[in-house]
Amino acid sequence: MTTVMADTQGEGSAPVQEIAGGSPRRSDSTPGALLRLLLVVAGGFALAVVFHGVSVLIVVLALVIMVMVHEGGHFVAAKLSGMKVTEYFLGFGPRIWSFRRGETDYGVKAIPAGGYVRVVGMTMLEEVDPVDEARSYRQSSFPRRMAVAVAGSAMHFVMAFLLLWGLEAFAGLPVAAVPQVTALTQFASGQSPAQLAGMRPGDEIVSIDGHQFSQYDQYVTFIQDHLGATLAVVVRRGSKDLTLHVRPVNGQHVKIVEDGKVYSAESGSASKPIGFIGVDLQYLTRNETVNPLVAVGRATTMLGSVTSQTASGIAQVFSLHGLNNFVHQVRTAGVTTSSSAGSGSTTSSASSSSSSSNSGQIISIIGAIEVGSQALRQNVSELLYILVAINIFVGMINLFPMLPLDGGHVVIAVYERIRSRRGRSYHADVTKLMPVAYALLLFMVVLGVGALYANIVQPVSLPGG
């Protein structure tokens, strides 16, 4: 499982912004402000094109959408609950562009490190205008507070489901396909058995003597074990299936020509000669899609499976052993050979290929962007699965029962509900939780900085990335 440590100023940081309050409310929807925003966007796109980073830009945009959908969950839940929402912003710091609709400011700020939605009165620490107190989060009913608190994390699971559905119905999951002839070996003594049979580069081997195999080496072994036998090989050439007859020769007696030099072919053991036909094979994959209605059930099953894997991965990563491994990872970054680099082509399902190289490893937002861009360069299905993993991880982490995460607000709402009596609402003293909240925030910052350092010094990679 690929585990991503989100920036501390990302999705889980909205409560900090809410507690601390926002910048003075003002609208900056002038043509000049909009022009500045468009220039920034155009500049970023131009840089991506010049430095061949379009795949990186696409992944960044996907992560930005994830952040804003998370905050959009809080926003919609608060609006529907009648709470007063004053800001919904992408980024932090100075405003670049904004506009006001009703009582809410929408816009973009200068530091694109996440996003936030500001609901008045998230805790008893915040000063609220008496006029707005009745519509504050803290004065709302328990069900409404719970809905707002969990809405952000819930949106990650919704996004994960939609991505899995799109993966099954449109992008397709990589499945085992057939080996393809990439080149014909030139024999020093004349034509090879493959050439004599009429094979061509690009032919896909469908079956040999009626046998179809799920693994590349099974085709090779079958040929090697049938020295001297005439094999009926069905190949797919374009849209047609052709049956070719090939007779493997003894590889011990074969000399091949490469770059003008003569070499001995691989001949196996002296006691057991092997069949040799003179082809280079590459085992390809194809993306298999299903009916959109069938995809609903499959996406639901996969969502449960990935959620279970993610929970196990989180427990592993944040165990004492996992944290020790993380410290070792940071200390040895750039010193030892990266264990995440793989060789060979990706031939398994998206779930295994996207997680095998970085299993149990904490990666930063930079690492997540790098892995995502590598996945996109391989195929869209790989990227979709990476985004699914990120969504589920962030959704689960945000439910951790401590401020400044969403789970902290859930726990406070539950505790206040338990302590409340008829006609008298109980409000928890959040100041008692702040030392622990600051400790957790510091822990997240340390992990984030450590992972960022490790990923810059020793970039992560997918097999084939």
Image (cartoon, grey):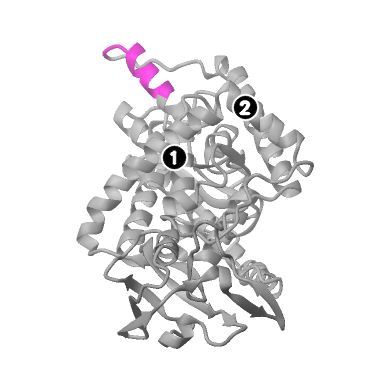
Is residue 394 part of the magenta span, yes or no?
no
Considering every residue shown, the one lying at the far left of the view is: 293
Hey, what amino acid is under mark 1?
Answer: Gly
Quadrant for residue 17, please give it: top right
Q: Earlier in the sequence, mark 1 or mark 2?
A: 2
Region of the chain picked out in magenta, as a range: 411-422
Label at residue 130: none
**Mark 1 Cα shell of 10 Å, populated few (<14), some (14-19), many (≥20):** many
Q: Would residue 422 be found to the left or right of residue 370 on screen?
A: left
- The residue that disc 1 covers is 395
- Total numbered badges shown on the rendered structure: 2
Pinpoint residue 156: horizontal percent, then vertical percent: 41, 46
On screen, 205 above or below 213? below
Q: Nearer the viewer, residue 354 or 101?
A: 354
The answer to whether residue 92 is visible is no
Q: Would residue 385 be found to the left or right of residue 330 on screen?
A: left
Q: Nearer the viewer, residue 376 or 97?
A: 376
Q: Residue at x 41, y 62 (%)?
A: 225
Q: Residue at x 35, y 48 (%)?
A: 158
Separation (CA) of disc 1 from disc 2:
21 Å
**Dot 2 lies on which element?**
helix
- The residue that disc 2 covers is 323
**Dot 1 lies on which element?**
helix
Considering every residue shown, the one lying at the far front of the view is: 271
Q: Nearer the viewer, residue 135 or 296?
A: 296
Quadrant for residue 257, please give it: bottom right
The quadrant in which the C terminus is found is bottom right
Q: Would residue 155 be found to the left or right of residue 181 on screen?
A: left
Hey, what amino acid is under mark 2?
Answer: Leu
